[in-house]
Amino acid sequence: MAGLDVSDVLLDPDFMEKGLVCKRTIVDVGSNGRPIKTESSHPFNAVVTTNSGINLDRQPDGTIIKGAINLHTRFALIAGGEYQQADEVVWRNQTYIVIQALPNLHYGRGFVKAVCIIKPITG
């Protein structure tokens, strides 16, 4: 597939999901030495493919829903770093955490493949 530019397919409205939202959190250090979180939301479009699907994992102390998706997009998703938490992506009313963001240059200029897992429910 080297040299094959599939950007026309990935940008085709028949394949692309519209209206995904990236929730981005940046952490700065305030003058008092405490962290200051800045959150922002960014709408974007992507081709969404399954990674592991949605799995129900029954455990003795409860049920855990696991799952992962792949996103192919030109929006620069981030898996986190020293001063930035991993992006959270909302797709079909479910929140996913970006665990890996890979340059997909073989798909055409500027594409990123992001592997995202379902955000665990805490409570």
Image (cartoon, rainbow, N blue to C red):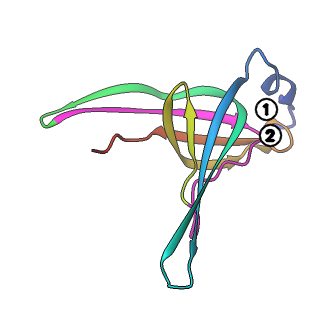
Q: From the viewer's perspective, is residue 70 above or below residue 92?
A: below
Magenta residues span 62-84
Give the class, few, some or many, for how many residues have Cα within 10 Å of label 1's Cα (few <14, many ≥20).
few
Snapshot quadrant of residue 5: top right
Amino acid bearing label 2: His
Q: From the viewer's perspective, is residue 12 above or below residue 113?
A: above
Q: Nearer the viewer, residue 11 or 38?
A: 38
Task: Left or right? Give the position of 60 relative to 12.
Answer: left
At which x and y percent is residue 99?
53, 49
Q: Nearer the viewer, residue 68 or 84?
A: 84
Mark 1 or mark 2: which comes first in sequence? Answer: 1
Q: Which residue lies furthest to the top in this view?
A: 14
Which secondary structure lies at badge 2? Answer: helix
Task: Tell which tag, 1 or 2, sits nearer the viewer.
Answer: 2
Snapshot quadrant of residue 111: top right
Residue at position x 63%, y 27% from top?
A: 48
Amino acid bearing label 1: Met
Q: Are marks 1 and 2 in contact (CB under 8 Å)?
A: yes
Residue at position x 56%, y 70% from top?
A: 82
Quarter occupied by the C terminus: top left
At which x and y percent is residue 25?
58, 57
At which x and y percent is residue 39?
59, 55
**Residue 1, numbered label:** 1
Task: Left or right? Give the position of 71 relative to 6.
Answer: left
Q: Name the residue under label 2.
A: 106
Residue at position x 80%, y 36% from top?
A: 107
State the CA–CA distance, disc 1 to disc 2: 7 Å
Residue at position x 31%, y 45% from top?
A: 122
Q: Does the magenta stretch include residue 24?
A: no
